[in-house]
Image (cartoon, grey):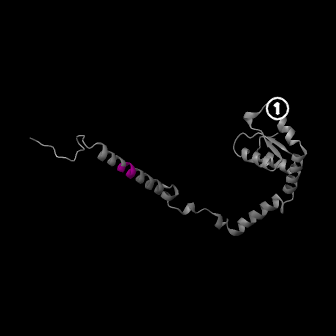
């Protein structure tokens, strides 16, 4: 039984152990769903924990199908083209050789401040909304308030 954290999920995948996951927050929901999707785990929501639901979840992960899926995931996880250490060393050397991956860097550092914070979008949106509401207010005054003083187009007689 696990909360579905990344390290516990990785350990379960490496060792080929089926899991009953009860996620609480963050990435635990995705990790638990990935375990269940691969057939090596069951998601048991915290709100649904009862004696019967825990028993059913444990019974499901101890079935031969779940055990076999866990072993297949473990086999795939252990037989990667390069070990995690070799992969880390390769990426460090690659970044050092290419100068920090210039093609993968974000262009947001080169944007003007108003574009970076999207003030240009806000100004256009607010301007549109002000004009839109002003048109509706003008139309409402023009149609509905025709005879009310101050809004009439007719001249008043003074004598």
Q: Give the percent coordinates (x, y) of residue 103.
A: 64, 67
Q: Nearer the viewer, residue 50 or 7?
A: 50
Q: Residue furthest top?
A: 51
Q: Secondary structure at mark 1?
A: helix
Q: How many marks?
A: 1
Q: Is residue 133 magenta?
A: yes
Q: Nearer the viewer, residue 54 or 1?
A: 54
Q: Give the percent coordinates (x, y) of residue 82.
A: 83, 62
Does residue 121 sit above or below 28 in this rendering?
below
Does residue 80 sit above or below 30 in this rendering?
below
Q: Nearer the viewer, residue 52 or 28?
A: 52
The residue depicted at 85 percent of the width and 51 percent of the height is: 14
Q: Give the percent coordinates (x, y) of residue 94.
A: 73, 66
Q: Give the percent coordinates (x, y) of residue 102.
A: 64, 67
Q: Is residue 102 magenta?
A: no
State which region is magenta: 130-135
Does residue 149 sit above or below 121 in this rendering?
above
> Circle 1 sits on which residue?
52
The quarter of the rendered structure image containing the C terminus is top left
The residue depicted at 87 percent of the width and 46 percent of the height is: 66
Does residue 109 sit above or below 18 in this rendering?
below
The residue depicted at 39 percent of the width and 51 percent of the height is: 132
4 vs 143, left or right, is right
Q: Residue furthest bottom?
A: 97
Badge 1 local density, few (<14 within 10 Å), some, or many (20+)?
A: few
98 vs 110, left or right, is right
Magenta segment, prevailing SS (helix, strand or loop): helix
The residue depicted at 81 percent of the width and 58 percent of the height is: 84
The quarter of the rendered structure image containing the N terminus is top right
Q: Residue furthest left?
A: 159
* Residue 5, quarter of picture: top right
């Amino acid at each position: 039984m696990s909360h579905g954290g990344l390290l516990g999920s990785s350990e379960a995948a490496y060792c080929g152990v089926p899991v009953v996951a009860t996620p609480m927050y963050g990435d635990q929901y995705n990790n638990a769903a990935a375990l269940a999707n691969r057939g090596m785990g069951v998601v048991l929501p915290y709100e649904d924990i009862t004696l019967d639901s825990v028993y059913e979840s444990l019974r499901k992960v101890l079935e031969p199908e779940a055990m076999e899926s866990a072993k297949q995931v473990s086999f795939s996880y252990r037989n990667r083209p390069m070990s995690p250490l070799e992969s880390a060393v390769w990426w460090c050397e690659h970044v050092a050789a290419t100068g920090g991956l210039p093609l993968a860097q974000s262009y947001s550092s080169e944007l003007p401040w108003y574009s970076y914070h999207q003030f240009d979008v806000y100004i256009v949106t607010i301007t549109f909304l002000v004009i839109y509401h002003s048109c509706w207010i003008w139309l409402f005054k023009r149609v509905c308030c025709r005879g009310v003083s101050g809004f009439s187009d007719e001249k008043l007689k003074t004598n």
